[in-house]
């Protein structure tokens, strides 16, 4: 019988004092790193009660009323003998039903939210909460009700600043604006306001998205949150976990009229600039440079020699405006303004608007594939004036020449063609006299009477120049050609692809 020896079992040796100390030190370091990471990420709050208790006294309900006149469309009081005992009876009867001898009026009331930003009684809310109000009453959580006056309003960002008309008998709780640029998607937030007129109400959620454009105005850059926001929350604050206001609750997306978890707040980065100006001037004073811009698409990017779609493409420059004085040209792509990167077209209006008038800033543009730095002295938006074209001598007629290319029939401009197509005497370029309805040019919206001003960012004045520039783009291996087209004095860029534009 073959007996096997039992397998040896290796028992761990007792740790030496030195080894034990090393292992313990390693464990402490690992635990320290773990807790440091957890602290940086900020744990899920077990309750918002302390934060809500501290912040709620500074959040107010705003009640407004306005008198709305309406035309009298009811029956008229019947003619009665003067002094008739029925005269007062009929007058009272018809007045109650909208009749009588004049237009009737009624008071309309609305409710919203706001928050105190200064112990002197300055209160922030939405413009649409107090718009056209005859009376504004601020109701505090402690039961006090005080009248307020409008300091200033900015409909473009839907913000307004109020001030109490009298000093309250006790100190007013207030809150501070925070850094909304530091807010990250996923951060916890709480909203406090007056939904449906119920009084102080608190809801919690997270930042769902940043930089939302909901097409409500030229400076849209909303924070999106899933914290419940309903009717009446408008003008209320959105707080971070430090108790700072990082947004002003302004709008919701809702098919039903109630909260579906998609609310929008004006970020503090925009609100603070607006509120500071309203407080100082009573109005908004935005910067202005005098350009008309459009988004850079992938097709346009190739024609503009950009490695990717970015920036704001200049389609027109206001005569005698700041941009023209700084050397900006049609076809420039603005990539940076005063040190701020312009990734999308909508980044530029906000950057310019926030720049004080009179400041001279650096602006980086891409022009024909090469970057240039320009200096622009920012003007006031309200100071913009329409340039009046002076009288021009009628130009001589040019020799007739026609070309057909990419589905377009082209002709040189002369006096008769200008008059027939209502083209200004100072407009340079090549006239489109016909467009093939099956061509890409037609699909891109080009039509008879349009004027091609540039091809591949080179000015053209004859059909031959248009043909030559298009041929040069093909020879370089480009898949499309960039045209600058004028219609009625308004210019825009159009990218035509060669393979799609080829004749059948």
Image (cartoon, rainbow, N blue to C red):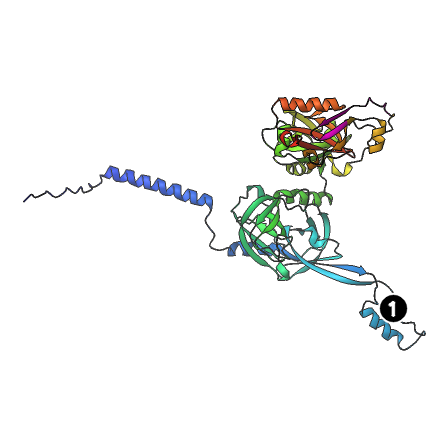
Q: Position of residue 497 (x, y in %)?
A: 64, 31
Q: Which residues are magenta?
A: 394-410
Looking at the image, residue 93 sits to the left or right of residue 80; the answer is left
> Does 118 sit above or below residue 68?
above
Quadrant of the rendered structure where residue 424 is?
top right
Say what secondary structure mark 1 lies in. Answer: loop
Which quadrant of the rendered structure holds the N terminus? top left
Q: Position of residue 170 (x, y in %)?
A: 64, 57
Whether the magenta-drawn stretch holds residue 409 is answered as: yes
Q: Position of residue 209 (x, y in %)?
A: 56, 45
Q: Circle 1 sits on which residue? A: 76
Residue visible at 73% across and 51% down in the picture: 150
Q: Nearer the viewer, residue 336 or 236?
A: 336
Q: Residue furthest front?
A: 504
Q: Nearer the viewer, residue 323 or 411?
A: 411
Quadrant of the rendered structure where residue 11 is?
top left
* Residue 118 appears in the rendering: no
Looking at the image, residue 83 sits to the left or right of residue 41; the answer is right
Whether the magenta-drawn stretch holds residue 133 is answered as: no
Looking at the image, residue 444 sits to the left or right of residue 67; the answer is left
> Does 182 sit above or below residue 486?
below
């Amino acid at each position: 019988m073959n007996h096997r020896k039992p397998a040896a079992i290796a028992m761990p040796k007792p740790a030496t004092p030195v080894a034990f100390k090393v292992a313990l030190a390693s464990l402490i370091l690992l635990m320290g790193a773990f807790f440091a990471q957890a602290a940086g990420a900020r744990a899920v709050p077990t309750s918002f009660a302390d934060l809500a208790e501290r912040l709620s006294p500074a959040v107010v309900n705003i009640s407004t009323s306005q008198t709305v006149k309406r035309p009298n469309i009811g029956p008229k009081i019947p003619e009665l003998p003067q002094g008739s005992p029925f005269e007062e009876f009929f007058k009272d009867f018809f007045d109650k039903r909208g009749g009588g001898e004049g237009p009737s009026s009624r008071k309309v009331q609305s409710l919203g939210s706001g928050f105190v930003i200064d112990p002197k009684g300055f209160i922030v809310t939405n413009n649409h909460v107090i718009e056209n109000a005859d009376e504004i009453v601020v109701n505090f959580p402690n039961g006090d009700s005080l009248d307020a006056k409008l300091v200033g309003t900015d409909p473009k960002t839907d913000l307004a600043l109020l001030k109490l008309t009298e000093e309250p008998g006790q100190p007013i709780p207030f809150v501070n604006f925070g850094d909304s640029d530091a807010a990250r998607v996923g951060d916890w937030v709480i909203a406090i306001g007056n939904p449906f007129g119920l009084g102080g109400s608190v809801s919690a959620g997270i930042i769902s998205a940043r930089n939302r454009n909901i097409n409500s105005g030229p400076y849209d850059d909303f924070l999106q949150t899933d914290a419940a926001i309903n009717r009446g929350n408008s003008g209320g604050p959105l707080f971070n976990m430090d108790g700072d206001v990082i947004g002003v609750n302004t709008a919701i997306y809702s098919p039903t009229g109630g909260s579906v978890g998609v609310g929008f707040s004006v970020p503090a980065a925009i609100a603070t600039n607006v509120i500071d100006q309203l407080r100082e001037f009573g109005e908004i004073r935005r910067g202005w440079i005098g350009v008309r811009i459009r988004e850079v698409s992938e097709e346009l990017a190739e024609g503009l020699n950009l490695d990717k779609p970015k920036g704001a493409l200049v389609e027109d420059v206001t005569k005698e405006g700041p941009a023209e004085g700084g050397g900006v040209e049609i076809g420039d792509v603005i990539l940076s303004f005063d040190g701020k990167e312009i990734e999308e077209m909508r980044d530029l209006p906000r950057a310019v608007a926030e720049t004080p008038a009179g400041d001279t800033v650096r602006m980086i543009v891409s022009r024909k594939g090469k970057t240039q730095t320009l200096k622009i002295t920012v003007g006031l938006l309200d100071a913009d004036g329409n340039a009046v074209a002076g009288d021009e001598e009628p130009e001589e007629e040019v020799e007739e020449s026609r070309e057909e290319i990419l589905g377009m029939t082209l002709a040189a401009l002369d006096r008769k063609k200008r008059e027939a197509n209502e083209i200004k005497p100072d407009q340079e370029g090549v006239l489109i006299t016909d467009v093939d309805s099956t061509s890409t040019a037609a699909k891109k919206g080009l039509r008879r009477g349009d004027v091609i001003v540039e091809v591949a960012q080179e000015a053209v004045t004859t059909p031959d120049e248009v043909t030559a520039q298009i041929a040069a783009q093909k020879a370089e291996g480009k898949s499309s050609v960039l045209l600058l087209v004028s219609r009625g004095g308004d210019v825009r860029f159009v990218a035509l692809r060669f393979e799609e534009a080829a004749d059948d």
